[in-house]
Amino acid sequence: LVSSCCNPLNNYMVFNDTDGLYTYTFEAERKDDCAACSQRPQVLTFPEDVTLKSVIDFLMETPSYQLKAPGLTTMINGKNKTLYMQSVKSIEERTRENLPKRLKDIGLVDGQEIVVADATTPKPLIVKIHFSSDME
């Protein structure tokens, strides 16, 4: 009996049986900084006076994120704080007041991590906010 005489299936196999039989395998690769499948924080740099609304607009309009209705939470003084969440009406009404506020006025500091949840991503994104005094 012969075993281990070929390379094992590396990662992924496609099997098509529509008009005959066709199979092939390929190695699926993962980007270390992939926003969808990595838990590595995505670093975002904003001016010091950026508002929460501007950050949400950035996450919705930037081609690499394209979020629909992001919900943002973070830890401030050891407590979980919801910055904004529009998917639940009662929470949206209570957090709407944060939209025009600057991130620093809400209590965020340089290097703070924000967890961003959205229906378009399988896992929440972790975003690390950095402030820059001069944006180009």
Image (cartoon, grey):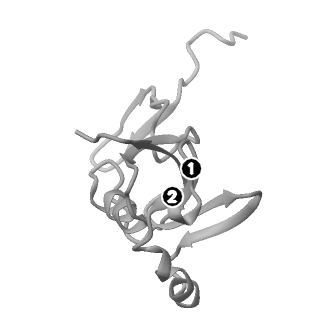
Read off the residue under disc 2: 104
Badge 1: residue crowd in 10 Å (few <14, some 14–19, many ≥20): some
Query: Callout 2: helix, strand or loop?
Result: helix
Outermost right residue: 78
Q: Position of residue 30 (x, y in %)?
A: 47, 31
- Amino acid type at image mark 1: Val
State left or right for residue 27 relative to residue 65. right
Residue 6, compared with residue 57, is above or below; it is above
Residue 13, compared with residue 65, is above or below; it is above
The number of discs equals 2
State left or right for residue 29 relative to residue 74. left
- Amino acid type at image mark 2: Lys
C-alpha distance separating marks 1 and 2: 6 Å
First in sequence, mark 1 or 2: give its number: 2
Residue shown at the point (49%, 30%) measured from the top left: 32
Residue 49, compared with residue 71, is above or below; it is above
